[in-house]
């Protein structure tokens, strides 16, 4: 699978958020603020996983030959990836 620039940009934003959280910790910021930012990072990661799985599923379905009977299997596999990420 080729990852699109928007997906890569999401990961770069997450990386920046994590650096911000580390700086907050080093600066001794309040626990509540740190946890709030970590929750935001987790949400961003979850959304990114969803985007990657859905893009991959669409790509697989579009490129598959003779997928009759396999569509359900592919969808289940994609759902399992999302569930496993939780």
Image (cartoon, grey):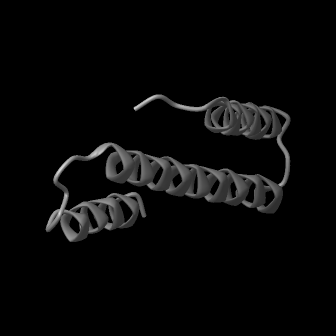
Quarter location, residue 80: bottom left
Residue at image x 72%, y 34%?
22
Residue at image x 49%, y 49%?
55
Answer above or below: position of 17 versus 39. Answer: above
Residue 20 horizontal side relative to residue 8, left or right: right
Q: Where is residue 58 in the image (x, y as percent from the top left)?
A: 43, 53
Residue 85 horizontal side relative to residue 71, left or right: right
Q: Position of residue 20 (x, y in %)?
A: 79, 36
Quarter location, residue 42: bottom right
Q: Which residue lies furthest to the front in this view?
A: 66
Residue at image x 19%, y 65%?
73
**Nearest to the observer: residue 35 or residue 46:** 46
**Nearest to the observer: residue 66 or residue 58:** 66
Residue 49 horizontal side relative to residue 34, left or right: left
**Nearest to the observer: residue 65 or residue 7:** 65
Answer above or below: position of 42 versus 16. Answer: below
Residue 51 horizontal side relative to residue 68, left or right: right
Quadrant placement of the C terminus: bottom left
**Nearest to the observer: residue 10 or residue 17:** 10
Residue at image x 55%, y 52%?
51
Q: Where is residue 40 in the image (x, y as percent from the top left)?
A: 72, 57
Q: Where is residue 84 in the image (x, y as percent from the top left)?
A: 33, 61
Count of numbered labels shown in the rendering: 0
């Amino acid at each position: 699978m080729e990852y699109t620039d928007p997906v890569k940009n999401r990961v770069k934003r997450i990386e920046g958020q994590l650096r911000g959280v580390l700086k907050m910790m080093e600066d001794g910021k309040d626990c509540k603020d740190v946890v709030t930012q970590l929750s935001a990072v987790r949400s961003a990661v979850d959304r990114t996983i969803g985007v990657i799985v859905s893009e991959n599923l669409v790509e697989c379905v579009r490129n598959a030959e003779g997928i009759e009977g396999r569509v359900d299997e592919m969808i289940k596999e994609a759902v399992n990836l999302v569930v496993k990420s939780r």
